[in-house]
Image (tube, rainbow, N blue to C red):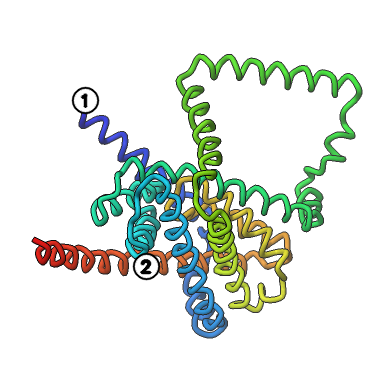
Amino acid sequence: MKIELRLSNIIVKIILPLVLGGAILYWMYRDFDFGSISHVLLDEMNWGWMLLSFPFGILAQAFRGWRWRQTLEPIGEKPRSSVSIYSVFLSYAASLVIPRVGEFTRCGVLKRYDGVSYSKALGPVVTERAIDSLVVACFSGLTLLLQLNIFSVFSSRTGTSMESILSRFSLMGYFVTAVCGMSALVLLHFLLKKLSIYNKVKATLGGIWQGVISLKNVRNIPLFIFFTFGIWASYFLHYYLTFFCFDFTSQLGIGCAMVTFVVGSIAVLVPTPNGAGPWHFAVKTMLILYGVADQNALYFVLIVHTVQTMLVILLGIYAWVALSFHSVNNKIYNNQIN
């Protein structure tokens, strides 16, 4: 029974995300000429802008480590800043193997190297999720308002404009649709109430709300806001600067970067390693709407995602090596005290 349970966990947590991401990538690149990518990398790409984006990718994770450390202080835990940052570096790298495992990894790192309670370290993660979800929602709303025209283009090209859909409805059609919609919502409510998942979802939403409320215990709220702004500004610049690596994206402007950033941020919610597959598809689709040729859009998402993933791996390796020295230094320090 235990073996079957472990096998099912491996399938759900590792194999299925890999299959899903791999299937999407295969579908997107099934006719792609991979031999041509070396020409783009060596002759057409401006690596200066890519290198310039790296510090912002590092800063985003560092800000997250500092913010996490700040949220731990009110509950009596004070890990070292370096260990907090290294734990975040490792967590992102670990999530490349098993999606979403990074949050547990960084809690384990703090427990091992600074003796932080695992349950206490995991608690503020709920707060982080709530705040980051709020930031993404606000950024998405702002982007939608500023770039309404591109969504109109999407509707016209796909034939899904609201005008064309609503024009087919009569007054009775609106009424029937409303009744069916309300009935479906009521039925869904009662069905979920009978299922265990209802309580899980309710508990999750309650946890997010508690996470937001717990901010009142965080000391120096302006610093917390600064860290949060720093995280997402760094994420955005880490992505936006890559536009200038290619001639076909360098003139698109910050509006396109905002739209593709938002869409990509939502796409990575699909549990594949570093959003591989869903991120490629979402960003490529939006780039095409902005007039980028299909082949060039494929170049962009493949190169940018691969290079930035390599940075995550390198930071994870660096953190692993640095933490090994932390462990040795701690042992020497403890021996000196004894």
Up-down: is 192 above or below 39?
A: above
Q: Residue at x 27, y 36 (%)?
A: 7
Residue beneath disc 2: 315
Image quadrant of residue 236? Answer: bottom right
Q: Is residue 136 above or below residue 329?
A: above
Q: Residue at x 79, y 45 (%)?
A: 159
Secondary structure of the residue carrying tag 2 is helix
Q: Quadrant of the N terminus?
A: top left
- Residue 161 — which label? none
| Rendering coords of residue 118 (x, y %) | 31, 44
Q: Position of residue 176 (x, y in %)?
A: 81, 18
Do the CB atoms of the residues marked 2 and 1 lie less than 8 Å apart? no
Q: Which residue is mark 1?
A: 1
193 sits to left or right of 252:
left
Amino acid at dot 1: Met
Circle 2 crowding by C-alpha within 10 Å: few under 14, some 14–19, many from 20: many
Measure the alpha-carbon separation of dots 2 and 1: 38 Å
Task: Find residue 56 and report its horizontal and vertical position in percent.
Answer: 52, 70
For the residue marked with disc 2, what is the amino acid? Answer: Leu
- Residue drawn at 50 percent across, 51 percent down: 24
Q: Earlier in the sequence, mark 2 or mark 1?
A: 1
- The quarter holding residue 191 reads top right
Q: Is residue 26 visible?
A: no
Quadrant, the C terminus: bottom left
Image coordinates of residue 223 in percent, x first then y, are 54, 59
